[in-house]
Image (tube, grey):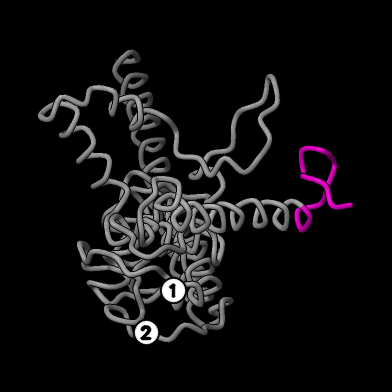
Amino acid sequence: MPLKEADGGSNAENLALQNIQARLRMVLAFFLAQLMPWVRDRSGFLLVLGSANVDEGLRGYLTKYDCSSADVNPIGGISKTDIRRFLYWAADHLGYSELRGVVAAPPSAELEPIREGEEAQTDEQDMGMTYDELSIYGRLRKVSNCGPVSMFRSLLVTWKGKYEPHVIAKRVKDFFRYYSMNRHKATTLTPAYHAENYSTDDHRFDHRQFLYNYKWPWQFQRIDEIAENLEKGARKKSESKTHDATQEGEEDVYKEGVHSVN
């Protein structure tokens, strides 16, 4: 019997159980959409709305045929960052003050059991990257047509002083690894309102291939080389400054000694 990781199960068991849970949400949603008109003594059926945003589609942070599968997805082409901004706007201008609590709550798939004394599952922790970072990756990937190396070079400028080159390298490689591994999911994304230039809907807006070598051997090796050279150069510069400062200090001591003798 497979177990959740919290109960001693392996990662494979944990993911399989999470995926079943996620797909059951989709089945129940369509089940209710068909039966609700019948319950109300009406004809026809309801459309199911999806809830995956464009950043989750880009990262592939969804289960194929889970609750991201629907008839229409009103937020499927909108970034999480813009959704948050809209909810804040709606709280302030439309009188829905409770939406501030929605924005403040950490996004979670809610597929892991909540145990006392343990932190609840969060999307950003699971993904290994923030939604704000995903928005940046999406625009660089689609709008600026960046591959791994050119994205890394661009982020060296954008994140200068925020992250070391090897940290930026790891983040870029992580993104492209998951992007390429999960790109096949874009072929089943629910039709969405086209609101972002980096929509992942491969049927209409993104005609890139959906099968990649997720190891990106040449690109990742080149990124590591650039990061290593940059950090070597920074270390040499730092060592040179330290050496110069030491020399200046020794000269000052010498001058002070000469002055005291005189």
**Magenta stretch holds residue 154:** no
Residue, far top = 260
User: Where 166 falls versus 221 (above or below)?
Assistant: above
Assign a secondary structure to mark 2: loop
Left or right for 7, reference 24: right
Q: Quadrant of residue 6?
A: top right
**Mark 2 Cα shell of 10 Å, populated few (<14), some (14-19), many (≥20):** few
User: Where 66 falls versus 219 (above or below)?
Assistant: above
Q: Position of residue 196 (x, y in %)?
A: 22, 63
Residue 238 seen in this snapshot: no
What stretch of residues is rendered in magenta?
A: 1-13
Q: Amino acid at mark 2?
A: Arg
Q: Position of residue 95 (x, y in %)?
A: 15, 24
Q: Position of residue 206 (x, y in %)?
A: 31, 79
Quadrant location of the C terminus in the rendered image: top left
For the residue pair 257 and 2, the one nearer the viewer reads as: 2
Mark number displayed over residue 208:
2
For the residue pair 158 and 137, the one nearer the viewer reads as: 137
Left or right for 136, reference 14: left
For the point 43% across and 57% down, the residue is 56
For the point 33% across and 67% down, the residue is 153
**Mark 1 Cα shell of 10 Å, populated few (<14), some (14-19), many (≥20):** some
Q: Which residue is mark 1?
A: 186
Q: Quadrant of residue 148?
A: bottom left
What is the count of numbered marks?
Answer: 2
Assign a secondary structure to mark 1: helix
Left or right for 252, reference 12: left
